[in-house]
Amino acid sequence: MILPLTYEPHELLHRRLKDVDVKKITTREMQKFFKDMIETMYVKDGVGLAANQVGVDAQIFTLVKNYNHLNDREDLVLINPSWEKVSGHQAWDEEGCLSIPGLYGKIKRYTHIRVKAYNKKGELIEFEAKDFFARIIQHECDHLNGHLYAEKAKDFHREEKTK
């Protein structure tokens, strides 16, 4: 099921989301929500999607399999994620956001991070992420903590989507 997107200036986009009870991760309802989030992410042409972007107050985000360097056959679902930098190196790149359609800007992010989260099976996982994979994770974790990329970005420009 395609979920409706939440757009700026919705208040849910501006506060830290609630931690997920790990015992509930494997429930039928939660597994359906993960599938719906993934379907929505693809239909809306996103590379990642946070729960608050579909109106849900939960520390969950999805990431497309094309940029998931853990398993390129499966979309990644991270629950209650946290990350820390592995190296101090940062790089500028352009980002956009499904909750702020058509607006793009440059933002500086760490290029190598270590991530800790629960997966959709309720297993605690830890891994390192680099470059674009790391950028997506940082962008989505910002969402879960109530921050939008536009708060830190510069050199904005508008681009209308054509279909």
Image (cartoon, rainbow, N blue to C red):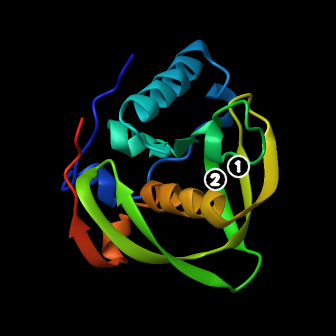
On the image, the x and y values in percent for residue 61 come to: 53, 43
Disc sitting over residue 158 in the figure = none
Dot 2 crowding, Cα within 10 Å, few <14, some 14–19, many 20+: many
Please say if the residues under marks 1 and 2 sit with CB atoms less than 8 Å apart: yes
Vertical side of 116 occupied by 52: above or below = above
Residue sitting at 68 percent across and 31 percent down?
A: 120
> Which amino acid type is marked by label 1?
Ala
Q: Name the one closer to the observer, 118 or 111.
A: 111
Please, what secondary structure does the residue beneath circle 2 have?
strand
Q: Is residue 78 visible?
A: no
Find disc 2 in the rendering and name its residue: 81
Q: CA distance from mark 1 to mark 2?
A: 4 Å
Find disc 1 in the rendering and name its residue: 117
Vertical side of 96 occupied by 55: above or below = above
Residue sitting at 64 percent across and 53 percent down?
A: 81
Q: Is residue 16 left or right of residue 83?
A: left
Q: Name the one closer to the observer, 19 or 132.
A: 132
Q: State the quadrant of the C terminus.
A: top left
On the image, the x and y values in percent for residue 138 come to: 56, 63
